[in-house]
Image (tube, rainbow, N blue to C red):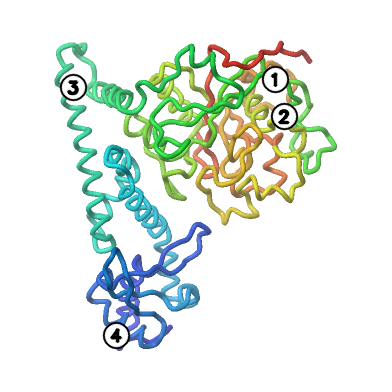
Amino acid sequence: MPRASCLDEKGQLALIRIAFIPHLARVNPAGQFVRRIATRTEIPPEARPLVDRLAEARLLIKDRRMVGGEDIDVIEVAHEALLREWKGLNDALIEEREFLIAKGQLEQDVSEYKKTPESQKEGALLAGNKLTRAREWLTKRPQDLTADERKFIVQSRRMALQRRMRVQALIGALAGVIVLGFAAYWYEQSLWNFYHWAAHVRGHVLTAQDERMLKPLASFTECVKTDGSYSKYCPEMVVMPAGKFMMGSPKNEKGRWEDEGDDEGRQHEVAIAQPFAVSQFELTFDQWDACIQYGGCRRIGSPFGGGKQPAVMVTWYDAQKYVNWLSTLTGRQYRLLSEAEWEYAARARTTSPYSFEGEESSLDEYAWYANNSENRTHPVGGKKPNDFGLYDMHGNVWEWVEDCYNKKYDGSPVDGAAWTKGACERRVIRGGAWDSIPRTVRSAVRGGQGPGKLVQMVGFRVGRTLFAGGGATTVAPGTR
């Protein structure tokens, strides 16, 4: 360890920690520790003499740069190897990895907030899990936050309180018409739903005429968009055309699991008679947070960060609660996909092991899996979509579907409906995850989990029934 002071080792490590974390180090998207440029004023005063000595030893670089139009002193690590090879520092960085990841997300949120037009700034403030976590930092470690970050957290908290005050005002206004004896919790929850509908959903739900105008592979969102085709308030949906496909895998498919009771067989034709919609991405923490804030979904852990990361640690029952909330909010039938619908959407008219007509060597372009994921989930939409415009159908996280997990397909529906009889003590999961090997993320692979089990590799994707059938041609269901 570099000797930078006459303090005992414990005291020196304490100064190293407050000097480097979070000011001089961060975690990049690949999960590696990399240097961060800090202003001298960001370094706590008690650690500045140590920083000066490390600069004299050429372990740190001191410079003057233009930051925000002002010429100020900045400091950065001379070489990122220091973050890996200085054991005391590396141990501290590993211990604080999750904080550094979340702190990087906070910096990005602050930057995006500053660039957001005034009329949309409310939607760019922190909410849900992010706000809860940031408020805790503001209380317990304010020295690790910049002035801009502290101000941003306070503004987010103030807006959350204003929203709550609006809800309380609505409660007072409606108190005379609410049935006496209703639990206060249900009063407030209903009004939160009303506020969310009025602020983010009203005017965006498709009418019957809108649905009739939909074409295959068209997309729609029944809430306010917050970032291109993405919304933190509800999923972006893509219209799947009606059609037929062969479900399961042939016995000669490369990578087929033969020792699992042949649960990919027997291969059979399924006819999807009516168009339906599928969410373009796996459900994200942003979208789950909206249900927490406005709909009563439970808080869940976030082992890989929030935002556009796929929501994990959700049970099958949690997924049902979310789609029921979204259905109530919009007045439209949101639901989990059936297993047949999931495979039909994943294959996108292909008959190959994956959703693209190529070799396994192309999988890196379409999926986060064991070979490239760095043992974690990644924000949705980072890889190529399949030909139906759906992202992450292979890897990132397993996805709950509606069906009970029955070995083999003997007796399964041939019309695309969910199989809700048989071994319902387990429910089907599809698609593989960030820790899956290539053969496990094939389109035909099936898995099963207890519906109440929490797993950091499992999330879900949303489906929606299209009552008007969109603009696609229907097909007659086939028979086996």
Secondary structure state at the residue bearing disc 3: helix
Whether pointer 4 and pointer 3 mark residues with C-beta atoms closer than 8 Å, the reply is: no
Mark 4 vs mark 2: give the one in front: 2
Q: Earlier in the sequence, mark 4 or mark 3?
A: 4
Q: Residue at x 64, y 36 (%)?
A: 447
Amino acid bearing label 2:
Arg
Callout 2: helix, strand or loop?
loop
Q: Is residue 470 left or right of residue 147?
A: right
Say few, some or many: other residues with alpha carbon within 10 Å of mark 3 (under 14 / 14 to 19 / 20 or more).
some
Q: Residue 226, image x and y in percent? A: 39, 37
The quarter of the picture where residue 120 lies is top left
> 114 and 347: which one is in front?
114
Does residue 436 appear to the left or right of 84 in the view shown? right
From the image, which quarter does the N terminus lie in? bottom left
* Residue 418 in the image, given as x and y percentages of width and height: 62, 20
Whole-percent x, y for residue 6 in the image: 30, 88
- Viewer-nearest of discs 2 and 3: 2
348 above or below 396? above
- Residue 243 is tagged as 1
Left or right of residue 220: residue 398: right
Disc on res. 7: 4
The earlier-in-sequence mark between 4 and 2 is 4
Label whose residue precedes the other's in the sequence (2 or 3): 3
Q: Badges 2 and 1: C-beta atoms under 8 Å apart?
A: yes
Judging by the rendered image, the residue that carries numbered circle 3 is 171
Mark 2 and mark 3: Cα distance apart in space: 51 Å
Horizontally, is 1 left or right of 364 in the view? left
- Indicate the amino acid at tag 3: Ile
Mark 3 or mark 1, whichever is nearer to me? 1
For the residue pair 438 and 146, the one nearer the viewer reads as: 146
Q: Considering only order in the chain, which callout, 1 or 3, is on the residue closer to the N terminus?
A: 3
Give the labeled residue for mark 2. 349
